[in-house]
Amino acid sequence: MAKINFTKEHYNKLLQLAAWMLMGNITITTKMGTVLNIVELLHTTTIQTLNNIRLSLGKAIETLENQDEWVAETASQSKLAVLKNQKELVNLIIGWKRFNLEAEENAQKKRELTAKLNQLKESTKSPEDKIKELEAEIASLGDTEEFA
């Protein structure tokens, strides 16, 4: 799998568009008629669903762009701008989710490899080294007196 190239600039643009959507109380409607706000897009929507939304937004943009420019209303031009921003936002959310998924997988792999490395180091210790470690640990605990 290729490394996800989600940069700081992408993240800043995501924040900007997310704030635009939040402050404008803008929602996106899926093919099934479900209305999604920015929180749902970021945290509960799957990457596959986001891809489907991105494709349907692309088709809506294409439809508006193919209208005869001489009869197109100014309302359709503003609708086109909103759709383009929504498509860019959904695309950035997909990248952000993929980036986070990759980071999580890398962290899990690192934990597994560290555990293997520690196990290997422990298995190569001689009995004398293990005895010295245990004696040092016992000495560090010190003497504890019981009070009656």
Image: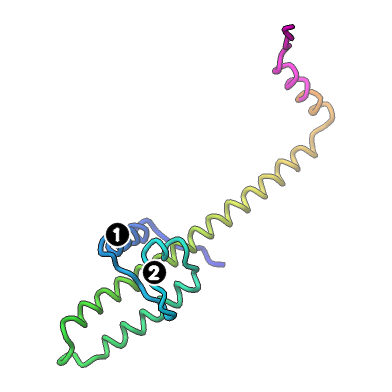
Of labels 2 and 1, the one closer to you: 2
Q: Mark 2 vs mark 1: which is more N-terminal?
A: 1
Q: Residue at x 53, y 66 (%)?
A: 2
Q: Residue at x 83, y 26 (%)?
A: 128
Within the image, what quadrant is residue 25 found in? Answer: bottom left
* Marking on residue 28: none
User: Looking at the picture, does residue 13 appear above or below residue 55?
Assistant: above
Residue 120 drawn at (x, y percent):
75, 43
Residue 142 falls within the magenta-colored stretch: yes
Q: How is the image coloured?
A: rainbow
Residue 127 drawn at (x, y percent):
84, 29
Residue 3 drawn at (x, y percent):
51, 63
The furthest residue to the top: 148
Residue 1 drawn at (x, y percent):
57, 67
Q: Nearer the viewer, residue 50 or 12?
A: 50
User: Looking at the picture, does residue 36 appear above or below residue 143?
Assistant: below
State the CA–CA distance, disc 2 to disc 1.
15 Å
Residue 122 falls within the magenta-colored stretch: no
Within the image, what quadrant is residue 62 found in? Answer: bottom left
Question: Dot 2: within a 10 Å radius of its alpha carbon, few (fewer than 14), some, or many (20 or more) residues?
Answer: some
Report the span colored magenta: 134-148
User: Looking at the picture, does residue 29 appear above or below residue 101?
Assistant: below
Within the image, what quadrant is residue 31 found in? Answer: bottom left
**Mark 2: which amino acid?**
Leu
Q: Which element is circle 2 on?
A: strand
Q: Residue at x 44, y 72 (%)?
A: 50
Which residue is label 1 attached to? 19
Which residue is label 2 attached to? 36
**Mark 1: which amino acid?**
Ala
Q: Nearer the viewer, residue 138 or 83?
A: 83
